[in-house]
Image (cartoon, rainbow, N blue to C red):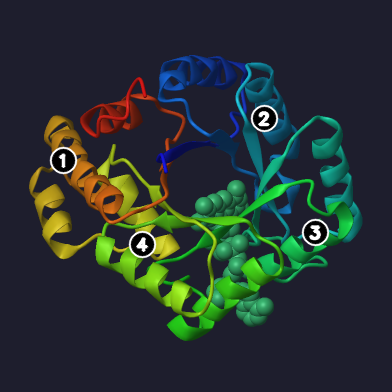
Amino acid sequence: MSLELSIEFFPPQTSEGMEKLRATRVRLAPLKPEFFSVTYGAGGSTRENTLATVMEIAAEGHQAAPHLSCIGSTRAGIREMLAIFSTRGIRRIVALRGDLPSGMADAGEFRYANELVAFIRAETGARFHIEVAAYPEWHPQSRSPREDLLNFKRKVEAGANSAITQYFYNADAYEHFVAEARALGVAVPIVPGIMPIASFSKLARFSDACGAEIPRWMRRKFESFGDDAESIRAFGLDVVTELCQRLIERGAPGLHFYSMNQAGLTLELCRRLGLLDR
Ligand code: FAD
């Protein structure tokens, strides 16, 4: 089976950002990704921009997958989004709970992503391919690894077709997670999420918040580079290439790149992995 690539964007908020993202897509198109996905702010905060970005991607002839997070939403609101996606020819959704934005008190009518997946299936049958999130190093709010794994299984039982993981730099964590999921009878593809490393300080802040570990040996080395952006980029490319190589060798079904709307690092990683011009 060939390796499926997918690439994630966030929806730009300005016309200049939209223009830059168009140029990014032109550069990434030779990778022939299975789909480009576009994130969705919890509570619907990026609704219009997510939709606009997704429609542009689809109009260029690529498969576009909007993310859809349910926290802070009503059933009627989600139903309306599904109808819009449906009439515009969208066939793949990344279904998430999302995180309640600070200051937003009303959690809405969905508590967890498995409820969103069940709702999408109940409303639209088999129309959409549904992706869900998985956490090889465990979701930061989960009570225990076992419960997190069972909650992941719930999303698959509710009708998810495949999963994309939170990014990680410990390949062991991914392999352990996949083995445990398989032992529980979860058979869907679990695609590793890959975060290229552009800036160590930003990555460190973000990783602390989302529960992804930067191994000590990597952290110490990045810290030793100080502000030397070139060394950070070079070392980041080396470690992420090695991570991807190992994941591919061990049978990962694909790679999902968190591109941060930039083409350079994703392209260079794929060039090193021999995935250009496939
Ligand atoms: P869930 O699967 O609902 O899990 C959340 C927590 O609740 C976990 O700790 C889980 O163990 C627990 N849990 C789940 N189900 C139950 C249950 N039935 N009973 C009790 N406990 C339960 N966020 C955005 O806002 N927009 C995006 O576009 C976006 N895209 C993402 C894409 C990917 C690939 C990933 C990995 C994450 C993305 N996120 C996005 C972040 C995500 O919304 C957060 O990680 C969020 O905290 C959890 O979302 P989830 O869908 O994994 O939630």
Q: Kindly indicate whether the residue at mark 1 contacts the one at mark 3 (C-beta within 8 angstroms).
A: no
Q: Amino acid at mark 3?
A: Arg
Q: Amino acid at mark 4?
A: Ala
User: Could you tell whether 97 is left or right of 262 in the image?
Assistant: right
x and y percentages locating residue 237 in the rendered image = 20, 37
Q: Which residue is mark 3?
A: 121
- Mark 2 to mark 4 CA distance (whole Å): 28 Å
Dot placed on the residue nearer the N-terminal end, 4 or 1:
4
Dot placed on the residue nearer the N-terminal end, 3 or 1:
3
- Mark 1 to mark 2 CA distance (whole Å): 32 Å
Q: Amino acid at mark 2?
A: Val
Q: Which callout, 3 or 1, points to the residue nearer the camera?
A: 3
Evaluate whether residue 39 shows in this view.
yes
Q: Amino acid at mark 1?
A: Asp
Residue located at (34% from left, 32% from top): 266
Q: Secondary structure at mark 4?
A: loop
Dot placed on the residue nearer the N-terminal end, 4 or 3:
3
The image quadrant of residue 219 is bottom left
Residue located at (42% from left, 19% from top): 30
Q: Which callout, 4 or 3, points to the residue nearer the camera?
A: 3
Q: Which residue is mark 1?
A: 238
Q: Secondary structure at mark 3?
A: helix
Task: Judge whether 3 appears above or below 125 on screen.
Answer: above
- Mark 3 to mark 2 CA distance (whole Å): 21 Å
Q: Which residue is mark 2?
A: 54
